[in-house]
Amino acid sequence: MTALFRNRFARTLTILVLVAGAAIAIAYFIFAPRQDNSVTEFWSAADSQSTQTIDHQLWQDVLDNYLVTDDPSGVALFDYQGLLDDGSEELNGYLEQLEAIDPRQLNRAEQFAYWVNLYNALTVQVVISSYPVASIKEIGSSPLPVGPWNDPAINIAGQSLTLNHIEHSILRPIWQDYRIHFAVNCASIGCPDLQAEAFTADNTEALLNLASESYLNHERGLNFSPNQLVLSSIFSWYAEDFGNSEAQVLTTLSKHLPQELAKNLADYDGAIEYDYNWQLNEIGE
């Protein structure tokens, strides 16, 4: 009787595990980031003659006060608790400022800085709205750990936008620059750093290159030894942005590496492993 019970229990447990796994897989497929063409079309307009500029000082103040860039880990960390303790007036004020702007009336350079800063500021707001959490993936309206990226985050020009809209239906398809993945921050250790400077029309190119180089020259972006290559999962999830095939991805990444490392990478013909750390990028106790 005991053996029979154990066998039934084992079978039931196996079925439950399989069902749960299937449910999570389906959920990830449903919530996977994808381009919404209607969103892309709506936000594709720009005014090339516009001289309007946006003051990002409120976001810069937040970065100056709560972003820690000298942690021994080499990862830029954020003081979410400090922001909560001090109040988030500057962050809220900045988001209200951007919400009142129709970015379609800006030129492309101003638009890019607008959307990147908006994404990063919204991500911080999303985290502090549920803080403390161990990972941003614990946040969101879904009962499954799929994160907040498909939840409505802000209303711009009468349009309700999610974080996924901003990244995958606006930034990626309109600008088609793989360095976007180094600019937007998902509040995780495995993610490229939140930059210490707010993006502006004038500093965008320099910041994009800085963000790319700093991430790829840290082990969480690229960890290479003669017999092993571990890349961030970003380069698997969004391979098409970096060249699609693994060889083309490596060629793209080599542009941001020291010459000797880039040459060794070009000669590498082994397997590639992918890894990502979803732990929150918060400062330690």
Image (cartoon, rainbow, N blue to C red):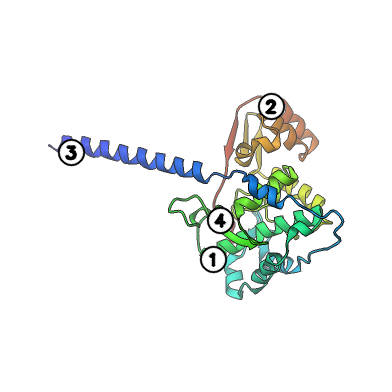
Give neighbour class at mark 3: few <14, some 14-19, many 20+ (Cα, 10 Å): few
Give neighbour class at mark 1: few <14, some 14-19, many 20+ (Cα, 10 Å): few
Q: Quadrant of residue 115?
A: bottom right
Indicate left or right for 3 with 105 as reference.
Answer: left
Residue at 61%, 62% (x, y): give it.
154
Which kind of residue does numbered mark 2 sit on?
Tyr
- Give the number of the mark in front: 1 or 4: 1
Comes first in the chain, label 2 or label 1? 1
Q: Quadrant of residue 160?
A: bottom right
Give neighbour class at mark 4: few <14, some 14-19, many 20+ (Cα, 10 Å): many
Q: Are marks 1 and 3 in contact (CB under 8 Å)?
A: no
- Indicate the secondary structure of the residue bearing disc 1: helix
- Which disc, if any, is residue 268? 2
Indicate left or right for 103 with 233 as reference.
Answer: right
Indicate left or right for 205 with 224 as reference.
Answer: right
Residue 283 percent coordinates (x, y): 59, 61
Q: Identify the image quadrant of the C terminus.
A: bottom right
- Give the number of the mark in front: 2 or 4: 4
Q: Nearer the viewer, residue 65 or 147?
A: 147
Q: Identify the image quadrant of the N terminus.
A: top left
Residue on which the image places disc 1: 129
Residue at 59%, 53% (x, y): give it.
188
Comes first in the chain, label 1 or label 3? 3
| Residue farthest along the left direction in this orientation | 1
- Which disc, if any, is residue 226? none
Give neighbour class at mark 2: few <14, some 14-19, many 20+ (Cα, 10 Å): some
> Whole-Å distance between the Cαs marked 4 and 3?
42 Å
Residue on which the image places disc 4: 280
- Which disc, if any, is residue 5? 3
Residue 46 percent coordinates (x, y): 79, 53
- 101 shown above or below 270: below
